[in-house]
Image (cartoon, rainbow, N blue to C red):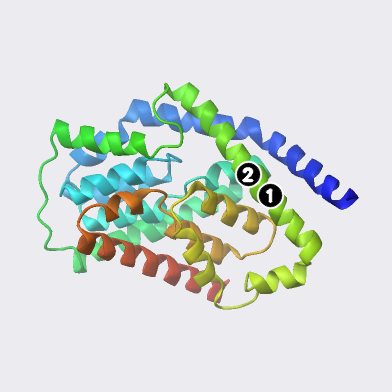
Amino acid sequence: MDTFVDILLDTLLDTAKALPLLAAVYLLAGWLEHRAGTVRLLAKLPHQLDVVAGALAGCIPQCGFSAAAASLYQEGFIGGAALVAVFLSTSDEALPVLLGSSGNLKMVALLIAAKLAIAIGMGFLLKAFVFRQETLRVADGDAVARAEHQADAHSCCGQHGFWKEALLRTLKIAAFLAAVLFFVNLGFELVGEERLGKLLLSGSFLQPLLCTLIGMIPSCGSSVLLTELYLAGGISFGSAVAGLSAGAGFGYLVLLRGDKKKAIRVIGWTFVTALAAGFLMTAFS
């Protein structure tokens, strides 16, 4: 009983420590989203720049941007390579949780750099060899409005003004974080580090596959879980990158509502790229 209470208190304390940084990150992300008009910018950029723009925009921790990008792709306004780049660079809640839990800017910078390199590099390869025959339409106001609606519909909190949305999102992710952190700590304490390590395939070359599959789950919780497992030492950096690169939030759900063939093509390339990156990083780290 004492162990349970200690873990609960430690979890609440760690979550409380993370709250100020979580709020700051979500306020900044909300301000950027509203000021920059990310969806409108991506839709209007020249086709030659869409991969880089998509990868950079995906780094901003926005719940709904991957859904908006998926909507633009299904309507033919951005290319498949750009959408894969968005999906690969999207980390959902990983960056705020990393900052809130550890405050390690070097770790955050390393994660962003790795995911950007993967997203941009693979995006240009796909543009040159896989999606090279795409014919894109010119986005109009109605198309952008529909994409923004998809972003709002799949955001964590909806439209409340960016500061209210940031506050609601902070509280929601803090609750996710507390639950995940509690069960991770409880697992290490009750199950044992060695046994839990076996469940997570610690030391196994197959761990990136497990993490990639977890990342494919369209939920904020999967990115929180992967981040906390990495911080706790349960998974390697390569496995964390694999899982977080595969995690595209609710973008997969929007994509699968449209042309299934197009959706499977994009999801397949996202999965293969994330898995390959995880294997390579694990092999050479």
Is the residue marked by circle 2 packed among few (<14), some (14-19), or many (20+) residues within 10 Å? many
Q: Residues within 10 Å of mark 1 (few under 14, many from 20)?
A: many
Q: Position of residue 40 (x, y in %)?
A: 24, 34
Mark 1 to mark 2 CA distance (whole Å): 6 Å
Residue found 23% across the figure and 57% down from its top: 80
User: What is the three-letter code of the residue carrying label 2?
Assistant: Leu
Residue at which label 1 appears: 181
Residue 84 or 200: which is nearer the viewer?
Answer: 200
Numbered-mark total: 2
Answer above or below: position of 86 versus 239.
above
Q: Secondary structure at mark 2?
A: helix
In x, y percent, where is residue 252? 34, 54
- Label 2 near label 1: C-beta < 8 Å? yes
Q: Quadrant of residue 147?
A: top left
Residue placed most toward the observer, 21 or 154: 154
Question: Quick one: 194 or 89, which is closer to the camera?
Answer: 194
Can residue 191 be seen from the camera position used here? yes
Q: Which residue is mark 2?
A: 177
Q: Is residue 52 left or right of residue 109?
A: left
Residue 103 seen: no
| Amino acid found under the numbered disc labelled 1 | Leu
Determine whether, in the image, residue 183 is placed left or right of residue 6: left
Q: Position of residue 35 (x, y in %)?
A: 35, 26
Task: Give me the residue at 61% from left, 33% from top.
Answer: 21
Is 47 situated above or below 121? above
Residue 156: x, y in percent?
Answer: 45, 37
Q: Residue at x 43, y 53 (%)?
A: 218
